[in-house]
């Protein structure tokens, strides 16, 4: 009788453990369709709301998804430089629009894209940058082949920062990288959020979550850790921006990325800054430092 009770409790524990890991892997993969948060992103309309001239564009990723974007040309029609804006996991192309006007006014063409998301098709999953890398590469192809761009910089936010770091390490077409609120290691940040939101321990749960995530997302989790790749970007310059009060991607991720990066590099340790909200913290410094960095190196 005692053996049966012990065995039943053991099986129940395994079932609960497995179900919890499956549930959390689902929370990673499946995104809700949400509206634009004005408090976070400030500008929720198209570029016309800031009096920025723009063109609705779209292009295909290598796996056949349609990636939409806004192409905002510089007033200088002779420039062959462009900045690619890449949003975070739950956001859209509106995330980078806080910086768009200052960058366009500095003489750069700007492309803000929507990474793959269920808003485009309900079956699309989020893979913490693994498949999203194809979208960034497709945007580079578009700028090069359709717009004649010869020199490209990138500004990424959160997962968009992580994605852009990995692509930049492998693709020399990106000459300069600015990364706001990026994570150093995907499983680390997921484990931290699981603890904060659900009170779930990292061990023994996260290794099984990672296995489910890999299998269900058709990905290699070792390939979505920017800390592993950022050092390969040098001698191309990187600018790390991270708020000390970031509750989504802890500040230590920014410190780790900066430590792993090669020269030339720059780090804004934004005291009191929240996740990717450094523009709201100090608009003048945010815009000026980003434009100055692109001007210096691009």
Image (cartoon, grey):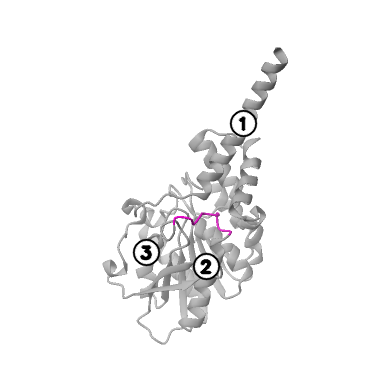
Q: Earlier in the sequence, mark 3 or mark 1?
A: 1
**Up-down relation of residue 244 to residue 123 (above or below):** above
Q: Is residue 63 above or below residue 249?
A: below
Return the mark for residue 97: 3
Q: Which residue is mark 1?
A: 15
Q: Nearer the viewer, mark 2 or mark 1?
A: 1
Q: Residue furthest top?
A: 1
Which residue, given by chain and number where applicable, does mark 2 sit on?
A: 136
> In the structure shown, which secondary structural element does the residue marked by tag 3 occupy?
helix
Q: Which mark is residue 147?
A: none
Mark 1 secondary-structure assignment: helix
Residue most toward the bottom?
78
Residue furthest out toward the right: 3
Q: Earlier in the sequence, mark 2 or mark 1?
A: 1
The residue range painted magenta reads 122-130
Question: Is residue 143 in the magenta section?
Answer: no
Q: Quadrant of the N terminus?
A: top right
């Amino acid at each position: 009788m005692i053996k049966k009770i012990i065995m039943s409790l053991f099986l129940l524990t395994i079932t609960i453990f497995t179900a919890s890991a499956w549930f959390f892997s689902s929370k990673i993969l499946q995104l809700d369709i949400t509206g634009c948060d004005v408090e976070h992103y400030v500008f929720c309309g198209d570029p016309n709301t800031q009096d920025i001239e723009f063109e609705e564009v779209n292009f295909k990723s290598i796996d056949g998804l349609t990636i939409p974007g806004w192409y905002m040309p510089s007033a200088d029609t002779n420039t062959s430089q462009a900045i690619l804006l890449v949003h975070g996991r739950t956001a859209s192309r509106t995330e980078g629009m806080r910086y768009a006007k200052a960058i366009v006014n500095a003489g750069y063409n700007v492309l803000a894209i929507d990474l793959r998301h269920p808003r485009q098709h309900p079956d699309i999953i989020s893979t913490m940058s693994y498949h999203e890398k194809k979208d960034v590469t497709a945007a580079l192809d578009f700028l090069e082949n359709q717009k004649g761009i010869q020199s490209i910089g990138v500004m990424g936010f959160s997962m968009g920062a992580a994605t852009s770091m990995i692509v930049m390490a492998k693709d020399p077409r990106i000459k300069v990288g600015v990364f706001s609120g990026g994570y150093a290691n995907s499983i680390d940040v997921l484990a931290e959020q699981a603890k904060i939101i659900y009170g779930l321990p990292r061990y023994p749960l996260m290794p099984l979550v990672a296995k489910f995530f890999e299998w269900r997302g058709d990905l290699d989790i070792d390939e979505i850790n920017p800390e592993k790749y950022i050092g390969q970007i040098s001698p191309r310059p990187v600018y790390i921006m991270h708020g000390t009060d970031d509750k989504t991607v802890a500040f230590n991720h920014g410190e780790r990325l900066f430590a792993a990066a090669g020269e030339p590099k720059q780090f804004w340790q934004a005291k009191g800054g929240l996740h990717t909200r450094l523009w709201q913290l100090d608009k003048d410094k945010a815009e000026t430092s980003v434009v100055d960095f692109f001007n210096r190196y691009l």
